[in-house]
Image (cartoon, rainbow, N blue to C red):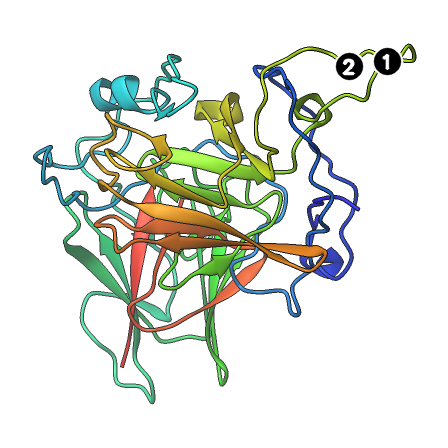
């Protein structure tokens, strides 16, 4: 048995073979042992379970708590900031040196084009239940609001009801918001960069899931063959190496364009991410809190579960949805370079 990813929501009940190839063999396994616990499927495909992605976007949200590092006004894809921070993350055992470059931003957020009779810019419309999508500004404040008066609204770059033609990280038709008697649902329209939902409670994560911390885009994976201990040779000689605890998973840092920039082998039962305190540090990312989030592995008999939790960070932790997710009043989701806050009354 092994730690395997679910390729889709339909396969969540029985995991498929891991589809990921090892793109960057930066790590040489020496002396640690393979974990043979099976990764359990979820009882029900949750709204925040991701499928297999191509990814290359960075987060766009409010300022950090900045106790030691004063916050700066937020401009997504600021090249001066991103060149310093995006891939100079450091773990305690493996400092990272590679620098990724991001494209410069527009001076202001993209102004959307509204193309739907049932979507009204600004103001409220009388309805049984009033729903608004509030565009979040670079500094985290509320921007333009769009009231939904119809059952669906499509967000995209060139097609759809709410368009952002200057956002190169949006698909032509990227996401759809659907209102029904069961509530409000956001659907990913098989986009390249996906839909990310800010988590408000611990969420289960699985191999292939992608999440955002500050400017850092991370993907959870199984331990590759290169990260496992090799058996002794036919003559009984065991390969010499550094004695290390066994890894239960691996995180890949995704750079601009979807490149696999760095990788981290996960050994502690709980891995803490932060700017100043934690096991995996991103010290130059001002949009990550001192202690930002955790990944926690739990063993239950022969099965294993992993939970992602935000530690009340200023800018939040975003998890890519698998297919669709239910959203409620106050929830925030990201598509491309745009962040929306949901308001329901």
Name the residue tied to disc 1: 233
Q: In the picture provided, is 309 more to the left or to the right than 36?
A: left
Position of residue 129 measured from the top left corner of the image (x, y, whole percent)? 33, 85
Report crowding for label 1: few under 14, some 14 to 19, many 20 or more residues within 10 A (C-alpha): few
Reply above or below: 272 against 25: below
Q: Is residue 248 visible?
A: yes
Q: Is residue 132 above or below residue 197?
A: below
Residue 63, by quadrant, is: top left
**Where does residue 315 sit, x and y in percent of width and height?**
25, 48
Question: Which label number is shown at residue 238?
Answer: 2
Q: Position of residue 6 (x, y in %)?
A: 70, 50
Distance Cα–Cα, label 1 vs label 2: 6 Å
- Drawn side of residue 141 relative to residue 299, left or right: left
- Helix, strand or loop at label 2? It is loop
- For residue 207, the mark is none
Q: Residue at 86% across / 13% down in the picture? A: 233
| Mark 1 touches mark 2? (CB < 8 Å) | yes
Relative to 333, is 8 on the left or the right? right
> Residue at the spot x=48%, y=28% of the render?
254
- N-terminal-most mark, 1 or 2: 1
Q: Secondary structure at mark 1?
A: loop
Looking at the rendered structure, the number of numbered marks drawn on it comes to 2
Nearer to the camera, 336 or 202: 202
- Figure check: 234 above or below 205: above
Residue drawn where x is 32% and y is 30% of the image = 281
Q: Is residue 332 above or below residue 284?
A: below
Could you tell me which residue is drawn at 59 percent across and 21 percent down? 243
Camera-nearest residue between 10 and 186: 10
């Amino acid at each position: 048995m092994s730690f395997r990813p679910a390729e889709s929501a339909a396969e969540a009940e029985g995991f498929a073979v891991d589809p990921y190839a090892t793109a960057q063999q930066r790590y040489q396994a020496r002396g640690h042992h393979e974990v043979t616990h099976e990764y359990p499927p979820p009882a029900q495909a949750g709204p925040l379970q991701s499928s297999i992605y191509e990814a290359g976007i960075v987060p766009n949200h409010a300022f950090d708590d900045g106790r030691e590092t004063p916050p700066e006004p937020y401009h997504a894809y600021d090249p001066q900031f991103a060149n310093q921070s995006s891939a100079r993350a450091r773990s305690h055992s493996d400092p990272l040196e590679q620098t990724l470059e991001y494209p410069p931003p527009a001076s202001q957020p993209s102004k959307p084009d509204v193309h739907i009779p049932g979507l009204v810019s600004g103001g409220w419309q009388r309805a049984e239940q009033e729903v608004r999508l509030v565009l979040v500004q670079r500094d985290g404040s509320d921007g333009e609001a769009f009231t939904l008066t119809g059952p669906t609204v499509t967000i995209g770059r060139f097609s759809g009801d709410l368009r952002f033609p200057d956002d190169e990280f949006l698909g032509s038709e990227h996401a759809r918001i659907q209102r029904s008697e069961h509530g409000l649902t956001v659907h990913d329209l098989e986009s390249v960069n996906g839909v990310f939902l800010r988590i408000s409670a611990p969420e289960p994560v699985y191999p292939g899931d992608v999440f955002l911390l500050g400017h850092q885009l991370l993907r959870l994976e199984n331990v590759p063959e290169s990260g496992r201990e090799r058996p002794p040779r036919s003559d009984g000689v065991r390969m010499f190496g550094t004695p290390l605890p066994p890894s239960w998973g691996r995180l890949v840092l995704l750079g601009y364009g979807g490149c696999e920039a760095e990788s981290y082998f996960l050994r502690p039962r709980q891995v803490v991410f932060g700017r100043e305190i934690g096991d995996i540090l991103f010290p130059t990312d001002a949009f990550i809190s001192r202690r930002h989030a955790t990944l926690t592995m739990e063993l239950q008999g022969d099965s294993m579960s992993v939970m992602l939790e935000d530690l009340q960070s200023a800018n939040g932790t975003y998890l890519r949805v698998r297919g669709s997710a239910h959203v409620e009043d106050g929830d925030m989701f990201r598509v491309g370079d745009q962040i929306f806050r949901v308001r329901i009354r």
